[in-house]
Amino acid sequence: MRKEKLLASVLMLLCASVAISKPKTSLVAIVSDSSTLKFSGKEIEAYAESIRQDGKRCAVIEDRWANPDSIRNELEKLYRTDFLEGAVFIGDIPVAMVRDAQHFTTAFKMDQRRDRFQSSVPSDRFYDDFNLKFDYLGKDEKRELIHYYSLRSDSPQYISCDIYSARIKAPAIPGKTKYEAVSEYLQKVVREKGTARKIDNIAYFAGHGYNSESMQSRVDEAVALNCHFKDFDGRISFTNYSRDNFVKYRFQAILEDEDVDIALLHHHGSDDTQYLSATPSTSSLAGYLDNAKRFMRGKIRSAKDTVKAKQYYIDNYDVPAEWLQNVTAPKITAEDDAYSEAMDVYIPDTYGRKGGPAFIMHDACFNGSFHLDDYIAGHYIFNPGRTVVVKGNSVNTLQDTWPTELIGLLGEGVCVGNWLKTNMTLESHILGDPTWRFASDEEGYKFDRSISLESGNPKFWKKVLKSADGDRKVLAVKMLSGLGAISADELLDIQKNDAESTVRLEAFRCISKYCYPALADAIIIGLQDDYELHRRLAAIVAGKNGDPGILPTAAKLYFDPTLSERVDFQLRTCLELFNYADVEREFSKLRAAQPNWPVEKNYAAYLSSLKRTEEQSEEDFAKLSDESLTFKQRRLTVSSQRNKCTLKGLDPMLSYLKDGQNQELRMLIAETLGWYVYSSQRDRIVEAVAACAAAESDEALRKEMEKTIRRLAPEF
């Protein structure tokens, strides 16, 4: 009865705004728990009205179920019948912890035999991709909002969000209840929406150890941002962590600057920390010695046996004993702690500060862990400043991604939700108001609406492709690829010949996802593109594809002295995945023309490393069929291929999948083969796994095989 009353109230709200028969505008649903709605009802209604004033309809739904499935069902009904564009979850809305779907993430690969709260991924893809299918595994015994789900084998094995979603969930703020924090935040959003804020200033930051600290990748990002934001007459500024010994204070000032409209943050992170700096560089001997002493003191304090640890440095590094005296003295410990804390930003560092940029992207691991009671990204919107929305990741994320893909749409009047809807992974989330958009002309607002209302219309997107530039053109390439309305030859032509680096990169990504037979050609084109990220992503896929025709181009890159650090990092992994004899043969041809680079010592060492790596790989795979070995002894050989996807391991793994005796190892092989999505042997893998599945009596193993088939052949 309660459900029927709730549905009736929802329909009344919809009818009060716009008739639902054939709406000309899309709908945004606000979902709030009962307690938050009771305390912040006035602010929630004001927020809903701000969405309506922006030209969209809005419905407020009270979550009386406290069950993810019930919320998802209501959202799906609205999507199927009423042009639902997005959903905003305010307060304590249940969290789906997804299992058996690590291929939907960029980096998360934790053993699921570990604690399930730690080995699951908190993800709102449960709520915004209605095609995905899940089995309910139960509620967490300790945490009220946490529910566990397993991705089913008959589900699509890729993410394609139907709507966008966002969380407005307060972190732990000293002196405020979560209800007070939500109310104040919503007041801020309504206020900021009335300012018609334009994008005039974009700042991006790179932290220690990110993307191999490649300056070429930093420079190319500025070039790419000018492609994203066509005809941009504002300012794009860059700050590297090495700008100061302790860049933290400059970093905080940038994020309080109201003149900065968008801040793009590339650094490492955790749920409570933004890791920014390394040990400050020095040019003095005293500075080097201080750094060494500080390092050893930290290692000694963290050791189980401090006396033994101290003696280790004395014996192995001839360190004078007096250097390590009073290591645990309160004064010295406090000085070292203060030094360490000056390198990074911690949650308490956000207290009392005001956010300046309207939008902040946290391109870091765990900063957006909204399923926890406290998470650092939340503090950037729940303050009295002007920041209203951030993007964050609930678990770890890969460095080598394209985090700014389509970001230029924000300069076209497109709201944050519609921008990110087409570029979500299992871990990525919008925190704050997803309907926020920067000021634009009426044409921009119309384009924002078209992203939802014209999503399935190839004629519309073909028109955009012909007439637009910048990220509108990028989006058209992406939408047409998803609709199957653009050919591989057309995409290859765009990738090779388009004048804009971002359009070329999008064509490559679409070929990688939708046009498997053309992938080797696309990789060769990508490895030669002048955009560093394009070359980097092509290098990653090259080794996993393994087509011998790619090798000459990949090998040639190794002899390029201008090769950026991060492309070099990925290229070395790529070349390991080809047969050593083939690599050595290509290298010999190239070495004759380039005898001075790489220097002989490094060149010989790398060849030796490649050979050892192949020999070790052959030895490991030879042991795979040895049934005298335990699962644990053979596990790493298989699981490492989730990252590598080398063709060298296919025959041993497929053979064991068919005839092996250890069911646990067969299960791991079945799952691992599903990572070979870029492989030139993909068709062969699908055929072999399908044959095994047809003969398999173990239901769990058969389902894992079926999941792998769907990952490699989405049309299955």
Image (cartoon, helix red, strand yellow):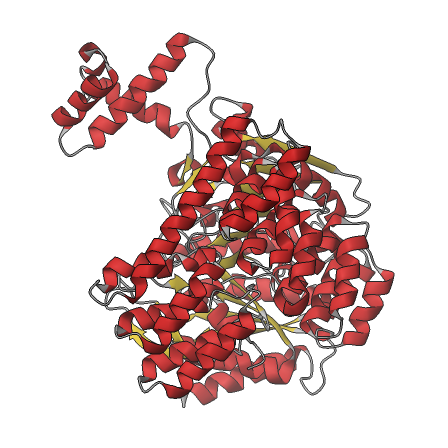
The residue under the point 63% across, 54% down is 550
> Where is residue 32 drawn, in percent x and y?
46, 69
The answer, for residue 384, to whether it is visible in the render is: no
Quadrant where the C terminus sits is: bottom right
| Image position of 578 (left or right of 198) | left
Residue toward you, 29 or 597: 597
> Where is residue 315 drawn, in percent x and y?
18, 18
In this view, 404 is above or below 356:
below
In this view, 211 is above or below 291:
below
The answer, for residue 461, to whether it is visible in the render is: yes
> Where is residue 486 drawn, in percent x and y?
76, 71
| Image position of 469 (left or right of 593) | right
Residue toward you, 687 or 73: 687
Quarter of the figure with residue 600:
top right
Residue toward you, 1 or 158: 158
| Image position of 99 (left or right of 126) | left
The residue under the point 45% across, 38% down is 608
Residue furthest to the right = 467
Quadrant where the N terminus sits is: bottom left
Residue toward you, 120 or 439: 120
Quarter of the figure with residue 444:
bottom right
Query: How many numbered callouts?
Result: 0
> Where is residue 535 drawn, in percent x and y?
65, 47
The residue under the point 40% across, 62% down is 121
The residue under the point 69% across, 79% down is 18
